[in-house]
């Protein structure tokens, strides 16, 4: 017997349920679920994702699928009391994609399947509205021609050929709006559409409903691999082999007059998280009209007044869904002649702020547990609570000066300033060059996704709060002002005209995504509430609900997490910010930054150019007091917490000029000849500086440098200790690959320490450890652990050496690699578990095997990446260290790691019990 | 009770034996062994290496050692019937170092201990030769002052201060030779020596024999860590923590007149391996005189005539020792008033040729087994049979022209041409810059060892066949002409004067180490016998005894080895050489070399500069036929054997000019503007090219390149196959780090293969595999093995990435690292077993775990390093691949690997049985 490929749903009976999400896709499983819990959904059936995968692998349908679809269709005809292709009483269906996870707008949909010159009459009769029937037919031919028959503009310049015909017709008839076209006009449009299809493609438009249905099913299957779907999957780490389900559903019509309509809604406000019904609808329209942002819809609150019965029913469903799903739902609905149908429900995308507010509220409402609340958040969403807003003074000034030129919808909160850019591809390019870009579009579409993701802000002139631009921006945490219809955007001329103002390509503008304001020029930004409460201390906690949410999430996270969260900070002010955001120590303090400050670079250069150890020591003696002062500041801020300081890491040539003029200047300053200096610069140059004379290799060959740094650190530690503050210095030797390197460097440090303690009359605890940033270091970690009291994974360099990728050079092919799925993720962003992660695992085993209580951490940039943090938890590290503003993110990710682990254990136990 | 630190030996009784080598050192254990087998050795005792190690660690003697030495000394007095410090009948002793393995001349020796103003009289009486007694006293003070009291020249310019006093005395007395100084003169010398010591060091010379003894013991212990000993250990991979034993032995005197003498000898000729007694002696001299090369000694054959009784006894001992030790022995002997004493025996250092001849002869004599013969050879010694000799025509011409200006001893066979250099430090420097250097010295000493090791040849004006220069040169396989006393070497002026000819610093000279000739100018060299028989084929095997030895060792090696030996060759001629030397396939054929030939580079550049895939394909089409021809030649030569061809590896910028002028030229040629070309060159430049866009990353982004190369390879394979020759192409994708990379490249190759086979009407077996040269590749070898049919370790790059060392840049600190013992060996020479080796092991396990029959090899330069070959055997690889001339070396090393493994198994079984 063939496998089951088709699942039917109707009334409160359904073969599927929300548990079958992987098989039926999000949309399909939720339609089944809604049917089960008694929410009105138009009946239909779902073809499984497995059938799609089979279709991809074998270029044909799996055995039995065709028959099962036919049977389900027959059942649907019976339930609906209509016939597919029946002239008098035609059944129309929609065909929609639906993957495991929502990929909004990425794949294809075809509505009104089953219409032809004969059935349209039956539809007109059953609707009692010939115009609506012909409008549906017109839409169907247009959509089918586009999606299934692939009739698209032939060049970038050409507008949509169907739209062109409509415009032509409107011009002929002298009308402005689609709605002003008569039934006869629509009939003519259908004729012209079909003619154009025949002319352009040499194909007849299929009149047979069955052919139409299979064409649409094929098109949905195929849309899984269209370029925008692929791009979306890459951005969201969705595997290519999941496939999409296909939902075939009886059509209901929102376009049958004033008693009909369609809308989308969120059960709570997705921008702020407020527990209020939020959505938009259009009367006498089909679903696509709302999402596409072509007509500006009404807020859902209007519905309460205009159609109180429908509104009440909808509001009831809203609560029922939230209670059932324990989460905010994003729904689509249609009402046809006053009868409400739910077309879709799914977890609603929301801003970081909303996500947090909803999670906290739901815990307080008793709807979900703290654990569920934490697990539901994306740690990166916290970013949005930390991001700056406009400087209020400057904003006020801009308002006074009349620089607020337009108001749109506050679709993506936050503040952004940047230069106008009209084209997504160009935005990508310019952002790549470091330009802050504001992407300005009439409306956005899924193919724009890459350009959107790199923009500081997005501004559209069309569409509502649930338009494509708004959804994507909120999800990505990008500032967005949408539907700003005062703007007149001219792509050709590259201008925005608003009243008398003309904004040109590359002009600076600013967007306030929280108010919807569009402001001329660049505006300085100011810290968010959280930052003001914690860092600036110019706001009281009780005055900021946002801060309170933040605080709640953080304290819940800290209840669960096992991992310590440290920070990478080189200066007292950075250290302070990090500590206020919850850092429990400094995991990486780079000392080389200190070498560049002010006049220090002169002494550093003198040291490098010295010919003898004694010359070197003289120059180092000049640097010593300055370094000491840096450390004093940091130790004070980090009182009582460990401070891990890395000795000099970059190759010496980084401190020398390479430009002709600078060399001449420096030579004069140093009192050496140009030739001599140039020779020195050249002799220090390296073919592969990443693999050259740097890290501890410097300290090994020039122990004086390490000695000076150790002295500066320990003298500072003694000084702060004498102030009565507890100091916990940890000295970290970089780029160790051979145990002996660390041994020699540790000797230097210990010798200095003894001297300093004697001189200062203070004795302090301190640790000596190393970074693990070379494959060999991980492999011989047992040897290194003989000396090292701690390891800190330098996953940036470890990734470079494990892959043989130079971060400086890999850009070219790495982008290609992720775009082609050769690498699923950029290994510089998230730890490569298979390779780099394996090295880390070997290292942890060997290191702990030799020294049971060795302290293990990570200070590569991965330390602030949630998935990498979770990996570090699973590895059993003691802490992660990340940049100050990522500390809260790491705290939450660390808590999630614990909860995920528990969940997995439970899962395993369940499995065991089953056996 | 204290441990035993002192081992006594005397007559045919000894507490030690040759089995205690690690504890007693080579010299000590062999003295004991000789005593046991009834060979006359002066009695004495050995302080253990463990005592030395303890002394180093604790800066004091181990408990009980002092007492045990005193007891042994008492026993020695009793055996000798003399008293240490006894005025009438004084016992004198020598104190010599002796490590586990011979480190000739590296550590210190003190003779004649026990002499003072009182005992010298007793010695004179017992010798019946006052002059000899005072000569011994004078030597003692001089040696003790130098070695123990550390009185050395104060600057490089100063000559030895003791020698200066002797010269002064000779001048005062108007004599030429030391021997012409009278007893009274010698007394005065002793006085002056002591005076100078007092003056320079402020110390009295110790008169107490016990103080003298302990001073000498300390000095020998300390000499383990003198700079030349450290340098020697590094060159020979001797661990620093072995320590040296100290041998205290009753003195016998070769300097008591015409009936006395001293000498050194080899039981066979160490230069040629001939089974004839070989050695030198001096009448009326002490041992150091022969080795130091200060007086030119007589050949041992003269002894047969002059002192037949001594000679006969010595010859008897020669045979007894060879039979006992089953190896050539290098002995020191002294005869005192006609009584023969053996002072030392050890395995004799020999040239590669001699080592091979001796090993083969001893097998044929039934003295040792084939296995023993193979194990006794250093694979690198084979090098000497392969190295070129002078072009015979050019040599004859040089002879005719009178350019042979001097004859010395043929101390190190082979032919060398190079530029004269007088100072070892300078030789190191100049050789480092690529200059061929002939090191010219009056005599060499152990501190010259680094300069010697980098020279093409060594020429000395003093010393014999067993002088320091000769010993070291033979061991290292360096050409050497020694004791060429016609040469007048002036270090100051940097000239060699020989008759009327003046040779200046940096002039070219040539040395024939097989004949001892010194020739003016540069001489072309010609292939060795082995090369002439196998490659040039202008010599019959039966005409060359050398070839026959080579052939025997090779065929024995092949009997035992399991590892295949492949070669790295890019051209037909190289492939031919390798095949003749025994290569069983090509393990690495680099294709990029082919890209540089002739006009090809133009097409390659055109390809790089192409803006579109089609432009790229056009340029590639030009390269295709040329590449195909290269492969045709190689496939023909390698008929029936696998040929592994690597696709393009270097980054594209390596093919572009970087020089301004060249860019202008190229721009003209390519018909693009200078700016455009410069932009392209700059855009391709990389910060770390080693980690950049190279290897398969090129082929992945530009699949057209791989497709062209695959086509060239497979078309060539089809063509040669049509000639009736068997071809076995294996296509190797470089720098894979991600399984998907290989997957994509394999797809490209397979697509091309199908097309080519169809076009050509031929179907061939071929393999697709990858290099493992990135840590990640080794770690995810299971994933890669899903596609790869073979792995070849690219240990050069694997070492670079595992260590994070750029080979181009690491020179600076790597030399420091090996000199300081941070790394015991250069990891680019011998595989780093701990780190890189561990990666290889992981890779082998994972690769075979996924694909049981995966073929595993190595094609990094380590494939020709004997220790690395053995490591590869232990890892279970299928083959090693090395440069053509190293193929024989790898064959022997592979055989040794099997024998070592067997030996180890036996050892383990023995241990088991013991339990």
Image (tube, coloured by chain):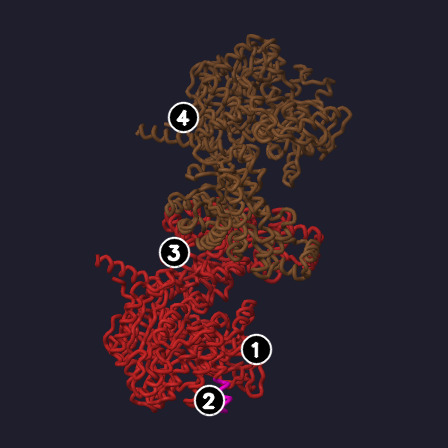
Chain colours: A brown, B red
The disc placed on residue A4 is 4
**Residue B702 versus residue B863: which sits nearer the camera?**
B863
- Point out the tag, 1 or 2, that comes first from the N-terminus: 2
Quadrant in the picture for residue B47: bottom left
Reading the image, the residue beneath label 2 is B177
Distance (Cα) linking label 4 and label 2: 112 Å
The x and y percentages for residue A58 are 46, 35
The x and y percentages for residue A374 are 47, 27
State which quarter of the image contains the N terminus of chain B: bottom left
Distance (Cα) linking label 3 and label 4: 50 Å
Residue B572 visible in rendering = yes
What secondary structure is marked by label 2? loop
Q: Residue at x 46, y 48 (%)?
A: A768
Distance (Cα) linking label 1 and label 2: 35 Å
Query: Mark 1 or 2, which is nearer the eye?
Result: 2
Query: Mark 1 or 3, which is nearer the eye?
Result: 1
Reading the image, the residue beneath label 3 is B877
């Amino acid at each position: 017997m063939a496998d089951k490929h088709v699942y039917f749903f109707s009334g409160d009976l359904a073969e599927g349920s929300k548990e079958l999400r992987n098989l039926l896709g999000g949309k399909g499983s939720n339609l089944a679920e809604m049917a089960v819990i008694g929410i009105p959904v138009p009946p239909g059936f779902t073809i499984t994702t497995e059938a799609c995968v089979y279709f991809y692998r074998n270029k044909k349908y799996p055995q039995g699928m065709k028959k099962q679809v036919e049977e389900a269709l027959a059942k649907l005809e019976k339930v609906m009391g209509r016939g597919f292709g029946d002239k008098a009483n035609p059944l129309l269906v929609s065909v929609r994609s639906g993957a495991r996870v929502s990929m909004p707008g990425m794949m294809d949909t075809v509505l009104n399947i089953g219409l032809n010159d004969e059935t349209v009459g039956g539809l007109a009769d059953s609707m009692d509205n010939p115009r609506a029937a012909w409008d549906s037919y017109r839409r169907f031919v247009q959509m089918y021609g586009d999606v299934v028959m692939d009739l698209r503009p032939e060049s970038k310049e050409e507008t949509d050929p169907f739209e062109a015909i409509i415009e032509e017709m409107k011009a002929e008839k002298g009308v402005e709006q689609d709605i002003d076209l008569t039934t006869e006009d629509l009939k003519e449009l259908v004729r012209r559409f079909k003619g154009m299809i025949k002319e352009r493609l040499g194909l007849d438009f299929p009149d047979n409903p069955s052919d139409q249905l299979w064409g649409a099913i094929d098109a949905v299957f195929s849309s899984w691999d269209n370029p925008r779907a692929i791009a979306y999957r890459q951005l969201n780490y969705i595997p290519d082999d999941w496939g999409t389900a296909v939902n075939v559903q009886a059509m209901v019509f929102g376009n049958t007059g004033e008693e009909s309509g369609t809308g989308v809604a969120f059960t709570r406000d997705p921008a702020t998280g407020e527990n209020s019904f939020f959505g938009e609808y259009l009367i006498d329209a089909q679903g696509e009209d709302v999402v596409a942002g072509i007509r500006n819809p009404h807020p859902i609150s209007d519905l309460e007044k205009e159609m109180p019965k429908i509104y009440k029913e909808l509001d009831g469903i809203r609560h029922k869904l939230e209670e059932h799903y324990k989460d905010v739902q994003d729904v689509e609905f249609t009402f046809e002649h006053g009868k409400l149908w739910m077309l879709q429900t799914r977890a609603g995308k929301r801003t970081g702020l909303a996500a947090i507010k909803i999670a906290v509220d739901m815990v307080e409402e008793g709807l979900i547990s703290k654990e569920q609340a934490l697990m539901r958040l994306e740690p990166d969403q916290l970013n949005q609570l930390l991001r700056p807003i406009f400087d209020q003074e400057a904003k006020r000034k801009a308002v006074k000066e009349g620089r607020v030129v337009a108001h749109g919808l506050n679709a993506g909160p936050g503040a952004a300033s940047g230069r106008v850019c009209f084209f997504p591809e160009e935005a990508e390019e310019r952002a790549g060059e470091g330009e802050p870009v504001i992407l300005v579009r009439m409306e956005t579409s899924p193919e724009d996704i890459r350009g959107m993701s790199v923009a500081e802000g997005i501004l559209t002139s069309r569409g509502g709060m649930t338009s494509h631009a708004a959804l994507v921006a909120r999800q990505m945490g990008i500032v967005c002002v949408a539907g700003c219809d005062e703007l007149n955007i001219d792509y050709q001329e590259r201008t925005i005209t608003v009243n008398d103002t003309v904004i040109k390509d590359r002009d600076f503008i600013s967007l306030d995504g929280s108010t919807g304001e569009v402001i001329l020029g660049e505006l300085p930004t100011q810290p968010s509430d959280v930052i003001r409460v914690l860092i600036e201390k110019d706001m009281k906690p009780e005055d900021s609900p946002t801060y309170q949410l933040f605080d709640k999430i953080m304290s819940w996270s800290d209840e669960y997490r096992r991992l310590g969260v440290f920070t990478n900070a080189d200066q007292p002010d950075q250290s302070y910010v990090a500590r206020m955001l919850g850092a429990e120590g400094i995991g990486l303090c780079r000392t080389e930054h200190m070498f560049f400050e002010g006049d220090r670079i002169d002494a550093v250069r003198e040291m490098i150019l010295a010919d003898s150890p004694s010359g070197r020591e003289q120059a180092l003696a000049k640097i010593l007091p300055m370094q000491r002062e840096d450390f004093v500041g940091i130790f004070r801020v980090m009182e009582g917490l460990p401070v891990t300081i890395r000795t000099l890491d970059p190759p010496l040539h980084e401190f020398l000029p390479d430009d002709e003029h600078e060399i001449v200047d420096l030579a004069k300053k140093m009192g050496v000849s140009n030739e001599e200096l140039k020779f020195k610069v050249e002799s220090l140059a390296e073919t592969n500086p990443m693999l050259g004379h740097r890290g501890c290799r410097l300290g090994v060959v020039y122990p004086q440098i390490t000695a000076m740094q150790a002295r500066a650190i320990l003298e500072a530690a003694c000084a702060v200790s004498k102030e009565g503050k507890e100091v916990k210095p940890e000295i970290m030797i970089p780029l160790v690959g051979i145990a002996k390197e660390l041994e020699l460097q540790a000797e230097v440090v210990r010798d200095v320490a003894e001297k300093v303690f004697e001189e200062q009359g203070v004795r302090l605890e301190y640790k000596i450890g190393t970074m693990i940033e070379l494959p060999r270091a991980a492999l011989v970690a047992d040897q290194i652990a003989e000396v090292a009291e701690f390891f800190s994974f330098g996953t940036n360099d470890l990734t470079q050496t494990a892959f043989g990728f130079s971060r400086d050079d890999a850009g070219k092919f790495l982008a290609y690699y992720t775009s082609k799925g050769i690498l699923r993720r950029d290994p510089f962003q998230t730890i490569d578990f298979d390779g780099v992660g394996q090295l880390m695992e070997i290292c942890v085993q060997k290191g702990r095997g030799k020294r049971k209580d060795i302290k293990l951490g990570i200070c590569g940039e991965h330390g602030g990446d949630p998935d990498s943090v979770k990996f570090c938890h699973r590895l059993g590290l003691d802490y992660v260290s990340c940049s100050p503003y990522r500390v809260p993110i790491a705290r939450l990710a660390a808590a999630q790691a614990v909860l995920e682990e528990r969940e997995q254990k439970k899962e395993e136990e369940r499995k065991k019990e089953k056996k």
